[in-house]
Amino acid sequence: MNIELINTGSELMLGRVLNTHQQWICRKLADSGRVVTRQVAVEDEANAIRDAVAEALERADLIITTGGLGPTSDDITRDLVAQLLGLELREDASALANIEGFFRQRGRPMPPSTRIQAMVPEGGDVIHNAHGTAPGLAIPIHPSRAKAASGPQWLVMLPGPPRELRPMFEKQILPFIEKHYPNNESFVSLTLRTTGMGESLVEERIAPELRELLNRGLGIGYCARTGEVDVRLVSKGSDGQKLVQEAALICRKLLAPHVYGEGDELIETELVRELIRQRQSVSVAESCTGGLVGHRITNVPGSSEVFHGGVVAYHNDVKVSTLGVPESVLATEGAVSEACARAMADGVRRLLKSDWAISVTGIAGPGGGSTEKPVGLAYIGVASAKETRAVRVMNPFDRETFKHSTSQQALDLLRRAISAQSSAGNG
């Protein structure tokens, strides 16, 4: 099956917006056993969009476009595709009702310009948008134009905002693809998420033990991000499920305790799940991460059951007055020190009466470092009723990456501490 992806938007070409659609859609399709064979990004310009779609029609069974379905003057994809295919645009009652309901629900008047989003090329199917006003569209390509496809040929158009596109793609487009382009060969995919190990080390640890499974048809891939590595296991055929499960057991054993989840799970999701299971609570004290640890925890549904709160103690006076960090610690060890991290964790746990506490203090840069304490240095503290400890980490990255990496390490440190204490209790 030949799938081509066309992302439209001048903001993509100017570097103002990161093209996350390319990665996300390709990954979702790959997980379903279908691989995108070509993807392009083009500006919001008539000739560029028309040429990209026309070229794809010559090759692809399925063409997916993103962007250009909104109400503004640069949203031209809908009109251009209709012209290219020789189709009239007609107002769709269901699409108009969704637009009207969107504004009515929010108590806002509907701007007349938004009505254009209800215009649908004749013969096209409307894809409901539960999170915005621009519907998606699925247009069957007439056999006279289907020069490349041996079977059905479709053009699917999706709105650009990720919060609209992603639910539509998962709930409606993937089932649509399965219906029109069934995957006759069994396909199994499983992604294990790890943290705290580099990509090369992950591969070195598991590759020798997986060699026999690879010879039997297992496929393996690695995706590295700062502080994380995903291990993707795939297989086809009647033995696919068995192969992937065997490989997953081997990986979990060899990479423990670095494996924290599967699929798209985030480490904070696993942490909150474990705290709920243990019926325990957590609070945070943050300096260099500026509240990011607390933000990530509270992004998880259900976190209100376990998260007591947090203190962003950026200034040393706040560390002393609110968290109870001894002035002597700051005078002798400094704010970026193991002693300070321990005191911050102890202080916020007492203050907010939680079972666990995380603290973070460090030097985000680009300035403020020294020979003894360089930019990227951080200390992470974890406190419970039984013990308080802190670890030293080095994240010599730009400021934003430093904050993300340090927050990831803090969440992982707490995850491991809870797991270790639970294992000790059960032992």
Image: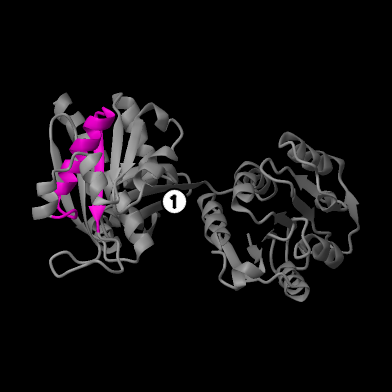
Residue 5: image location, x then y, percent? 63, 63
Q: 371 or 214, which lies in front?
A: 371
Q: Does the magenta portion include 65? A: no
Q: Reply yes or no: does residue 345 show up in magenta.
A: yes
Q: Residues within 10 Å of mark 1 (few under 14, many from 20)?
A: many
Q: Amino acid at mark 1?
A: Ser
Q: Is residue 50 visible from the viewing direction of this image?
A: yes
Which residue is found at the position 52% from the left and 46% from the top? Answer: 186
Residue 416 can be seen, yes or no = no
Determine whether, in the image, residue 203 is placed left or right of residue 233.
left
Q: Position of residue 94 (x, y in %)?
A: 82, 40
Residue at point 77%, 76% (across, down)? 47
- The magenta region covers 334-362
Q: Quadrant of the C terminus?
A: top left
Q: Nearer the viewer, residue 328 or 213?
A: 328
Local SS, label 1? strand
Q: Quadrant of residue 55?
A: bottom right
Residue 146 falls left or right of residue 277: right
